[in-house]
Every structure is written in C-alpha cells, then in structure tokens.
C-alpha cells in the first residue's frame, strides 16, 4: 500500500482538477459541448506524468517499467473513478436537466441514455489513462542500448 499512496494522492488531486474544470465549464454553460472534454486528457496526462516522475525520483535505481506503469495506471484509474462518480451525482442530483440537454444534442432515440453516458465517461477516462501511461513510460524507461 505504501507504493500506491503517491499515485492515489495524485489521482485524487487530478480528479479534483477535472471536477473544477467541469464546474467552470458548467458556469459558462459550455459543459454540454463534448469537445471541451478533450482538455480532460491534458489534465489527466499532467497528473499521470507527474506521478511517474515523482515515483522515479522517490525510488531511484529501484524504479523500473512495471513500477512506473503501475503508478500511472493507478493515478488515472483513481481520477477516472472519482470523476465518474462526481459526474453521475452532478447529472442526477445537482442538475437534473443536464442529461436531457445533452441528449437533445447527441442522442435522439436512446432509451437508456443515462447509463450510456456514465459508461462512456468511464471508458474514455480508462482508455486515456492506458494510452497516456504507455506513452509517458517511453520517456521514463531505462534504455537497454549501450551509449556510444
């Protein structure tokens, strides 16, 4: 658990930034425009990058690909899970008209639109986490090539 404390903390902070960004968009009335959610990838990427960087600094020579990968995945999954829970609470309890407004823009004939939206938010976060973690680990892994 000690090895996961840093990624969990970074995941909580990343989810807080994602929630703040969503609420700022909601204040401006832009939260139904899905294109603004592309910036969520930037926020998540920063959280994952910083987690891997600090994990490498903390572990020193003990750092390897598996430990960095686990740190990045944990951060992204925690952030995604917390943001998805917030998103579900927001759209069902705080702004009950949000999903109706969103469905008018994106889906006209889905009978279970609410479940599809929550599933999509979670899957987008998990996929972003996986891709960004794999990408960032290319920067942090040790090279097996001899130096010339």
Image: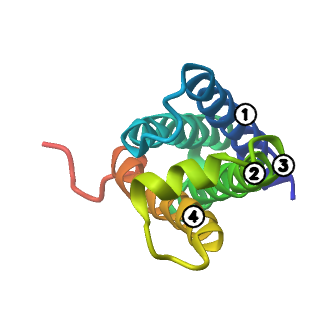
Q: Earlier in the sequence, mark 1 or mark 3?
A: 1
Which is closer to the viewer, label 1 or label 3?
Answer: 3
Q: Which mark is residue 16?
A: 1
List the residue tagged with mark 4: 117
Q: Earlier in the sequence, mark 3 or mark 4?
A: 3
Q: Are marks 1 and 2 in contact (CB under 8 Å)?
A: no
Q: Is residue 73 left or right of residue 143?
A: right
What is the CA distance from the residue labelled 1 to the residue labelled 2? 9 Å
Q: x, y (%) of residue 35?
A: 36, 41
Residue in the image at 72% along x and 33% along y? 16
* Nearer the observer, 13 or 64: 13
Q: Which residue is mark 2?
A: 82
Instruction: Give the CA separation, mark 3 to mark 4.
Output: 15 Å
Whole-angstrom CA distance, mark 1 to mark 3, is 19 Å
Q: Nearer the viewer, mark 3 or mark 4?
A: 3
User: Residue 148 is drawn in which quadrant?
Assistant: top left
The quadrant of the rendering that contains the N terminus is bottom right
Residue 32 is situated, as x and y percent measured from the top left of the image, at: 50, 41
Q: Which residue is denoted by mark 3 in the rendering?
A: 93
Callout 3: SS: helix
The first of marks 1 and 2 along the sequence is 1
> Does 89 appear above or below 121?
above
User: Element at badge 4?
Assistant: helix
Residue farthest to the bottom, as pictured: 111
Q: CA distance from mark 2 to mark 3?
A: 16 Å
């Amino acid at each position: 658990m000690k090895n996961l404390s840093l990624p969990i903390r970074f995941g909580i902070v990343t989810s807080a930034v994602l929630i703040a960004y969503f609420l700022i968009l909601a204040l401006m009335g832009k939260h139904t425009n899905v294109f603004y959610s592309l910036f969520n990838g930037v926020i998540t990427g920063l959280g994952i990058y910083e987690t891997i960087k600090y994990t490498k600094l903390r572990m020193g020579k003990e750092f390897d690909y598996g430990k960095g990968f686990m740190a990045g995945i944990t951060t992204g999954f925690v952030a995604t899970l917390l943001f998805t829970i917030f998103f579900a609470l927001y759209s069902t309890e705080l702004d009950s008209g949000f999903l109706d407004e969103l469905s008018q823009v994106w889906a006209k004939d889905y009978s279970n639109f609410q479940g599809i939206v929550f599933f999509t938010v979670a899957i987008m976060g998990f996929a972003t986490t996986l891709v960004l973690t794999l990408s960032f680990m290319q920067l942090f892994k040790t090279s097996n090539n001899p130096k010339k």
